[in-house]
Amino acid sequence: RNAEGGFDLEVAIVHSDGTSELYVGQVQGPRIDLATDAVVRPASAKDYAAATRMYGYVDGHLLWAWDIAALGAALASHASARLARAD
């Protein structure tokens, strides 16, 4: 456990355009918070500087949010979803 009572995470994600993201963060209860420590991209990829990702389990639903800083803009919402189990 870390000082906040959660568990530390390191996550690597590689996109189809060759962009690689290294995230650091933590799991705390039903929530996972991640922030990029590094973004590496090929010259042919769009400008992309940083990102955060949040995953959470609330009332039987998986919540997901992805914020990015790209094309010279500050960190802002890029995509999100609420996933429910089908009965």
Image (spheres, rainbow, N blue to C red):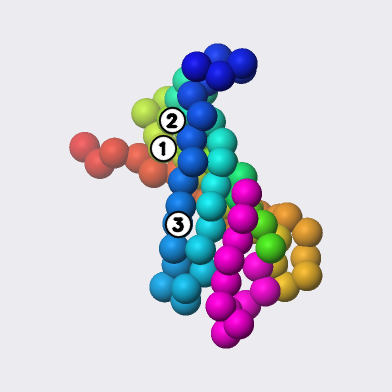
Q: Residue at x 43, y 30 (%)?
A: 57
- Which residues, given as a range, are shown in magenta? 37-48
Q: Is residue 16 above or below residue 4?
A: below
Residue 62, disc: 1
Q: Are marks 1 and 2 in contact (CB under 8 Å)?
A: yes
The residue beneath circle 2 is 57
Amino acid carrying label 1: it is Leu
Q: Earlier in the sequence, mark 1 or mark 2?
A: 2
Residue 7 in the magenta stretch? The answer is no
Q: Where in the figure is residue 11, as x and y percent of width and height?
A: 46, 46
Residue 47 in the magenta stretch? The answer is yes
Amino acid carrying label 3: it is Ile
Secondary structure under tag 2 reads: strand
In three-dimensional space, the C-alpha distance between marks 1 and 2, rounded to whole angstroms, equals 5 Å
The residue beneath circle 3 is 13
Q: Nearer the viewer, residue 26 or 62?
A: 26
